[in-house]
Image (cartoon, rainbow, N blue to C red):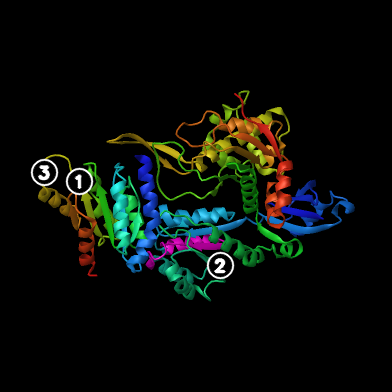
């Protein structure tokens, strides 16, 4: 028995063919995604790499997609540090891009903004269970009146859930009620909302995005980032290790962490909303292709030059950025460009980890100095896995992964000397897809897929 | 001693639902509770939590080292009737100033504010201290050593229960 796992990205359609009994990787292949015409064309092109015998006996087909802009969500909550943050976490955990997040009662201007953003889904939160109820009902009424034509997941105060559904019913295409993303103050519960988002994605959004044919033919299962997350979750649970996954893409750099991230040392007190065990962040301004100019802008060319073994010529970095930004599927052509690519990837990882991880703040009390921790402590994470085209293609991926961890800011809680692994065949998302069908086989494949690149020694 | 404190907490946490059930009251009135500022006195906070929960109130306990903003955010999300602020380390006057004004900004200007503990340092009578905090907008001010029952009776009176 075999399984065909498909990842339809915005640039490439990647297919992974695996044997299930016994589990091993048969091969991978990719072709340019044909978003302009029919997505099936790109898929068929990618499948040409396999012989008919190889494709014989495929019993399981599963696909994930980040094409057509991925899953685009607007999150709405009450207080920005509490339910708005909880709603954002839930949406990110479902593999979405959070286009915007709003707090308190929505204004006319905000409704206009939402209309302009054209989200696929609204995630409506606000109030703890039994807590504040006025604002979420007002927001439901405002959304109902706005004629947004966008499905809604309700994940707020449970006490007024049916009242909110009554308001929204027949005014938006669909309303799904999930459990509250923040049932008690500072307690996070993202899992039910993640499931509700996925349900709507499969039942409503794929149709709207023209992915329904793919869904019929190969069984679209989830957005790609969710598949990567599933892969990471499987790694964490089967290897019993704390894990960080960094995914450096053309448009974004995603970081996933799988650990509780609570304070590790005495004298450190955690503040704020609790952090999800499986946490995902997406940095839309850190990317190797589509987002390369925003990457250069947020880093500055000088900090990039610090990671190069040569002094770049005037305009060299910009010229390279121009080329890879404009040519679809462009790759480095010579050694200098490879060094540039490496330095860019290191910067993406370093910055994305800094934003994902928590930080410490010094405070003095009459009892002496203590530290306040915000966000997750990743310093004791056991292993860090790199994935994404730039790492998979790199000659020395350990240099990039290890280099990104050097010269840490002592107050940032980024990983310290984890074991470094590479998703060598770029199949972590495929393993995530397979995990739902056959978790045993997926576990076996993880061992084959992840190549240790060692710890960074110096 | 730390270990025994932790054990004590564990027992309280375990007993809390039982207390609530015993009292036979469905939690309705919501109290936001916490120790303000850079104050880390945790034991009294836990005792207040148990006492109020046992009485049938729903307690949103923010623990120690709570900022004014955290009190207010929690009160907004949970639709609380009262914010109860503890301060044991003598800097209460500094830490509590402006809380009422911030509540007004956040749209919960009418919420009840209670405060108690070793609120100031130096030789001032409790009457003076009470006046300072009432002028700051606190509805009830308690000196050290007051039992939780007193606050419960006051709260029921203030809420007309």
Residue at mark 3: B124
Position of A381 relative to A429 (above/below)? above
CA distance for labels 1 and 3: 10 Å
Indicate the chain on which mark 3 is placed: B
Mark 2 vs 3: CB contact within 8 A: no
Task: Give the crowd class for mark 3: few <14, some 14-19, many >=20 residues within 10 Å.
Answer: few
- Estimate how packed mark 1 is, as few (under 14), some (14 to 19) or many (20 or more) residues with alpha carbons within 10 Å: many
CA–CA distance in space, label 2 to label 3: 61 Å
Q: Which residues are magenta?
A: A108-134
* SS for callout 3: loop
Identify the mark at residue B64; answer none if there is no mark. none
Q: Is residue A236 above or below residue B157?
A: above
Q: Which residue is mark 1?
A: B119
Q: State left or right for residue A77 relative to residue A217.
A: left
| Precedes in sequence: disc 1 or disc 3 | 1
Task: Single out the mark in the foreground, 2 or 3.
Answer: 3
* Nearer to me, A167 or A344: A167
In this figure, which residue is indicated by the disc labeled 2?
A151
Q: CA distance from mark 1 to mark 2?
A: 51 Å
Q: Residue A227 at x, y = what percent?
A: 65, 52
Q: Quadrant of the N terminus of chain B?
A: top left
Residue A402 percent coordinates (x, y): 61, 31
Is there any visible trace of residue B77 in the rendered image? no
């Amino acid at each position: 028995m075999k399984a065909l796992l498909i990842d339809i990205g915005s640039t490439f359609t990647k297919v992974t063919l695996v044997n299930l009994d016994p589990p091993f990787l048969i091969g991978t292949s990719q072709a340019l995604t044909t978003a302009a015409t029919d997505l099936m064309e790109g898929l068929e092109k990618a499948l040409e790499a396999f012989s008919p015998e190889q494709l014989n006996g495929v019993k399981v087909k599963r696909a994930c997609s980040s094409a057509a802009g991925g899953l685009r969500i607007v999150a709405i909550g009450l207080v920005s540090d509490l339910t708005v943050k909880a709603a954002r976490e839930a949406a990110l955990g479902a593999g979405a891009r959070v286009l915007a997040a709003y707090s308190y009662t929505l204004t006319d201007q905000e409704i206009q903004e939402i209309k302009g953003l054209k989200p696929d889904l609204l995630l409506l939160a606000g109030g703890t269970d039994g807590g504040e109820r006025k604002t979420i009902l007002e927001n439901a009424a405002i959304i109902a009146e706005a004629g947004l034509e966008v499905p809604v997941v309700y994940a707020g105060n449970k006490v007024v859930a049916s009242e909110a559904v009554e308001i929204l019913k027949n005014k938006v295409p669909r309303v799904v009620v999930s459990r509250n993303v923040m049932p008690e103050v500072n307690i996070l519960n993202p899992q039910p909302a993640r499931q509700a988002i996925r349900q709507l994605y499969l039942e409503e959004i794929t149709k709207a995005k023209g992915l329904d044919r793919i869904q019929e033919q190969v069984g679209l299962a989830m957005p790609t980032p969710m598949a990567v997350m599933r892969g990471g979750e499987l790694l964490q649970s089967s290897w019993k290790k704390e894990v960080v996954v960094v995914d450096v893409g053309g448009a974004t750099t995603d970081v996933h962490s799988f650990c509780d991230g609570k304070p590790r040392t005495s004298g450190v007190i955690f503040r704020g909303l609790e952090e999800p065990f499986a946490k995902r962040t997406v940095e839309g301004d850190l990317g190797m292709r589509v987002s390369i100019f925003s990457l250069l802008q947020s880093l500055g060319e000088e900090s990039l030059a610090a990671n190069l073994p040569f002094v770049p010529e005037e305009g060299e970095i910009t010229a390279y950025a121009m080329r890879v930004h404009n040519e679809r599927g462009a790759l480095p052509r010579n050694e200098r460009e490879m060094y540039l690519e490496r330095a860019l990837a290191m910067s993406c990882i370093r910055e994305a980890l800094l934003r994902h991880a928590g930080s410490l703040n010094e405070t003095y009390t009459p009892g002496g100095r203590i530290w306040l921790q915000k966000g997750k402590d990743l310093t004791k994470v056991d292993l860090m896995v790199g994935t994404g085209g730039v790492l998979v293609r790199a000659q020395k991926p350990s240099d990039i992964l290890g280099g990104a961890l050097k010269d840490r800011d002592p107050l940032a809680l980024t990983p310290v000397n984890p074991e470094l692994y590479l998703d060598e065949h770029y199949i972590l998302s495929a393993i995530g897809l397979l995990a739902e069908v056959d978790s045993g086989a997926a576990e076996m494949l993880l061992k084959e897929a992840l190549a240790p690149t060692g710890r960074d020694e110096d | 001693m730390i270990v025994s404190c932790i054990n004590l907490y564990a027992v309280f946490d375990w007993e809390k639902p039982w207390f609530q059930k015993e009292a036979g009251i469905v939690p309705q009135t919501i109290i936001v509770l916490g120790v303000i500022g850079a104050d880390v006195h945790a034991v009294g906070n836990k005792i207040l939590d148990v006492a109020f929960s046992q009485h049938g109130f729903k307690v949103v306990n923010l623990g120690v080292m709570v900022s004014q903003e955290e009190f207010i955010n929690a009160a907004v999300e949970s639709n609380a009737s009262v914010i109860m602020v503890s301060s044991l380390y003598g800097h209460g006057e500094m830490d509590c100033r402006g809380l009422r004004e911030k509540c007004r900004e956040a749209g919960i200007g009418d919420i009840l504010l209670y405060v108690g503990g070793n609120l100031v340092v130096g030789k001032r009578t409790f009457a003076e201290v009470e006046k300072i905090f009432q002028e700051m907008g606190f509805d009830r001010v308690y000196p050290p050593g007051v039992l939780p029952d007193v606050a419960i009776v006051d709260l029921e009176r203030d809420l007309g229960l």
